[in-house]
Image (cartoon, grey):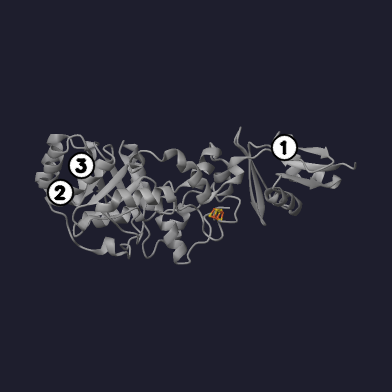
Amino acid sequence: MKKSLYFYIEPYVYIRGCESGIILINLLDDKAFTFKDIQSIKIGLSLLSSPKRTVKIAEEDLQTPIIIVTNKNFMGDIVSASSQPLQFYSEINEVSGIEAYRKSVIYSKYNIGRFISNCTIFVDMANQDCRDYIKCITGVESIPDNSICRVLSKMDKNDIDLYINKLVDINPNMTLNICGINCHLLDYISEKYPAVTINPILSLRTLKSSPELCDFIRQNKTKYTLLLDLPCDKSDIFIKDMIHSIYVKITNEEDIYDANNLSEIGCQIKSCPVLTSDNIDFIKSLLSISNDDLLNIDNKYRTIKINNLINSNFWGKIYVFPKGKVCYSLASDYIIELNQLYDTYKGDFLNGTFDWTITRNFSNCRFCMFQYLCPSPNHIETYLRMKGLIKCLMTKD
Ligand code: SF4
């Protein structure tokens, strides 16, 4: 019987491609190769669509870059056979998106409450600290249009007790960030819930205007997150405390310089790029990645796997607003009543179609070889895409 040549890749090789390129990653040693020539793309796409994970090639195809590189790096080979051979199933190449998530989540069905690891409680939406923190998290200067962020209501002590008890019932180890709080409430919560991890979020403005709050924090050595506007006075006593992490808004090059200076003196800085009306190009340059950035990612298997399943920016976080309204992400319109949080969350978690699982599924990313190497989309990128201001993060090359 006449034999033909068949090309295959090993199951430990990740392959992804589109009309403009094919990427192969050896998951054993993290080496990655991209191919942009027509014949390599044709062979790669045939391989991707083959149910047997092998592709018939001609003699002259042996000189195609994808075949030469694959052979040379022990990532695949050619066999001569009288009928099309079958290559082993390779999970990372076969299952993607929601299908992959649902397959993985089966193993996490029990005690799913533990996945809610971080909750921010906005106590008083009229407090400027809440608005500043929302800007840091979303990266957009204007407050999101959803109703939840725009209602200027506040919680009282009873509300806070009710909410904390419900949250701790779901996961006693959840970190509770509390924003828009005064000294009296902080004292009350700290005393009443000593076993709960409480992280107050306070601006320098609030601390300076409330000596009582400052004294409380100092005396109790309370760890807190400081919201700091740049530029700032490095000799400021709050910064010198170094008992907190500091969120700084980054809107231009000078802010980066100031933030680096703070890091150098030992502050734990979290830089939060924030889009304003006149810094679009600057923000785009911060989001920008290059071909080499992606090809040099360490542990690509882990990156691909995670980016295929979840959004690492949103995963594990919830936000609680006055009147017991809860959301998974601040720009979302999907609002849950705190009374029904656990049941709704359980359904969303198992179903997998909620903010925590928003993967890189934009129209042009869906067909790109870098879809799962590019970082999970964050609020700013999504906002820029919604406004038609960005199409691809790869603007460095
Ligand atoms: S942003 Fe989208 S289109 Fe651009 S490189 Fe990443 S996955 Fe591809």
Element at badge 2? helix
Point 40% across, 48% down: residue: 349
Instruction: Give the mark nearer the N terminus: 1 vs 3.
Output: 1
- Dot 1 alpha-carbon crowd within 10 angstroms: few under 14, some 14 to 19, many 20 or more: many
Q: Can you see residue 343?
A: yes
* Amino acid carrying mark 1 in the image: Gly
**Residue wearing tag 2:** 208
**Image location of residue 90, percent across then percent down:** 62, 40
**Residue wearing tag 1:** 76
Asked whether the residues under the numbered discs 1 and 2 touch, taking CB atoms below 8 Å apart as contact, a structural biologist would say: no
**Residue wearing tag 3:** 238
Give the side of residue 168 with respect to residue 293, left or right.
left
- Mark 1 and mark 3: Cα distance apart in space: 58 Å
- Mark 1 and mark 2: Cα distance apart in space: 64 Å
Where residue 93 sits, quadrant-wise, is top right
Where residue 296 sits, quadrant-wise, is top right
Q: Nearer the viewer, residue 303 or 272?
A: 303
Give the side of residue 322 with respect to residue 99, left or right.
left
Please tell me whether mark 1 or mark 2 is closer to you in this view: 1
**Image location of residue 341, percent across then percent down:** 29, 51
Name the quadrant of the N terminus.
top right
Point 66% across, 49% down: residue: 22
- Dot 3 alpha-carbon crowd within 10 angstroms: few under 14, some 14 to 19, many 20 or more: some
**Image location of residue 51, percent across then percent down:** 69, 47
* Amino acid carrying mark 2 in the image: Lys
Element at badge 3? helix
Please tell me whether mark 1 or mark 3 is closer to you in this view: 1
